[in-house]
Amino acid sequence: MDASSSAVPKHPQYSPARFEQTVLLLQGGGMLGSYQAGVYQALAEANLHPDWVAGISIGAVNSALIAGNPPEKRVERLREFWEAVSTSPLGLPYFPSLAIPDESTHSLLNQTRALGILLFGAPNFFTPRLPPPMPWEVNRADAVSFYDVSPLKATLERLVDFDRINAGGTRLSVGAVNVRTGNFVYFDTTTHRIAPAHIIASGSLPPGFPATEIDGEYYWDGGIVSNTPLQWVLDSRPRRDTLAFQIDLWSAEGELPHNLADADLRAKDIRFSSRTRASTDLYKYTQKLRIAFATLLKRLPAELRGIPEVALLASEANEKVCNIVQLIYRAKKYEGSAMDYEFSRRTMEEHWLAGYRDAVDSLSHREIFEPPDRLEGVRTFDFLTTAQRREMIMSKTMCRVVPGLALAAAIGASTAAILSKAEAAGDAAAGEHVFARCTVCHSPKAGENKIGPSLAGVFGRKSGSVPGYDYSPAMKSAGITWNEQELDKYLTNPPADVHGTKMVISVPNAEDRQNVIAYLMTLK
């Protein structure tokens, strides 16, 4: 039942060959950046390797880890980085199988871990300056901060091959702000020789981190001006037919806050989401104009083409098309406003899994690989997973119709009774619909192994026994016979059930699990 492989398999059905370039765009967001790593794992497993990676802040770090390693090593290096920076600064162990009973406990645990990061820093990333600087102290520009980022420099030098980056195999762009002029600057492999300082500059968010010196100028985090590299990529020349994956860590949409903590978090979401949708809408409109004029230009008589105004418009005209696939991390209620600096292993794994799950779901929509019509020019995609839609609907419904805890408890009890009946039955037809999301990794056909093994005949089969599939050692030695109970337990949380399994994507909804198990029972 492994769902992913350390190898990078070939999936020609996901080939972006109809586009001239594939671009990965990574926002800034601190600890939320492990969501981007999960997304990249899914892209790599589907054999989608970007021609160009652009990032801001932690997105710049992830970009460097991708561009600075060969394709077969990228996921490994991303995981090595995120495991290193999410190690407890106090040496506390991580227990992946330890269940957290409710959101209140989860919130308390996250805030406690965040406090530890504030006090002691994040290993291999940043350490506190001792004694802490006072507001009136006068220091060098590269020392005006609460934390020292020297550990990040050492980590980048260990995990990133900067010679590979500068060789130009994968284009890299990272954004930063010139502290003196306030100008937004991009360090790009087509114009600069990239070093660790350029990556660190893109994430030098004051007053936590100091300005980074490059060639006599000092730079801060690019997110101060814009937290997404979208505009830089879309405005770059020459323009090309583009398949872009825009990975955002902050959601522009959200609920009205009702306490100070929620207000702080909502303000962060709005501030750092960088109006991605507005930028995309503007690009869609301007690209339509470019295409329209390119079409008109072909019909203009020769004597009009020499007019300066026509020549100016002609310099902007083109018929290029673009698909923008947006994947947006949507924070859980228990995360709170510290979610971007709560560098715990549990939270890192949660974000990574969320990114992987969302990317697998998006890749199952084949239309993203179909270029738009030349008249349309640009198409955008934002797929919520089934679980996210259900969670949003339930959240809004409960807020509107449940005024008191007593009524909420009554509804919860009724819902549990309904779900228990659904779990006992399981709807194979509904399960087939759920399984459609799994076909990126698994085939229902016998003998057809993909990223994961064929699931034909899985019910009643011994774990790790499909011929020709390279299982993880953990799955080979698990000794499980896949019955209804074992499948339910495994699909609820694969890494917790079989520690060391390659499969990281779960089926969190109980009704979905029972339905998909009913469907699996029909596969022979």
Image: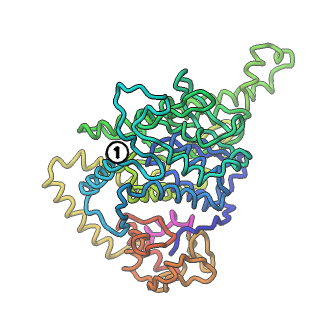
Q: Position of residue 70 (x, y in %)?
A: 67, 57
Q: Give the residue furthest to the right.
A: 302
- The amino acid at mark 1 is Leu
- In the image, the segment drawn in magenta is 428-441
Q: Position of residue 400 (x, y in %)?
A: 24, 45
Image height of 97 relative to 67, above or below: below
SS assignment at label 1: helix
Q: Position of residue 280 (x, y in %)?
A: 55, 35
Asked if residue 324 can be seen in this view, the reply is yes
Magenta stretch holds residue 430: yes
The answer to whether 234 appears left or right of 147 in the picture is: right
Image height of 211 relative to 413, above or below: above
Q: Position of residue 385 (x, y in %)?
A: 45, 55
Residue depicted at x 54% and y 30%: 219
Q: Check disc 1 and report the residue beneath it.
A: 118
Magenta stretch holds residue 272: no
Choose top left, top right, bottom left or bottom right for residue 363: bottom right
Image height of 438 relative to 117, above or below: below
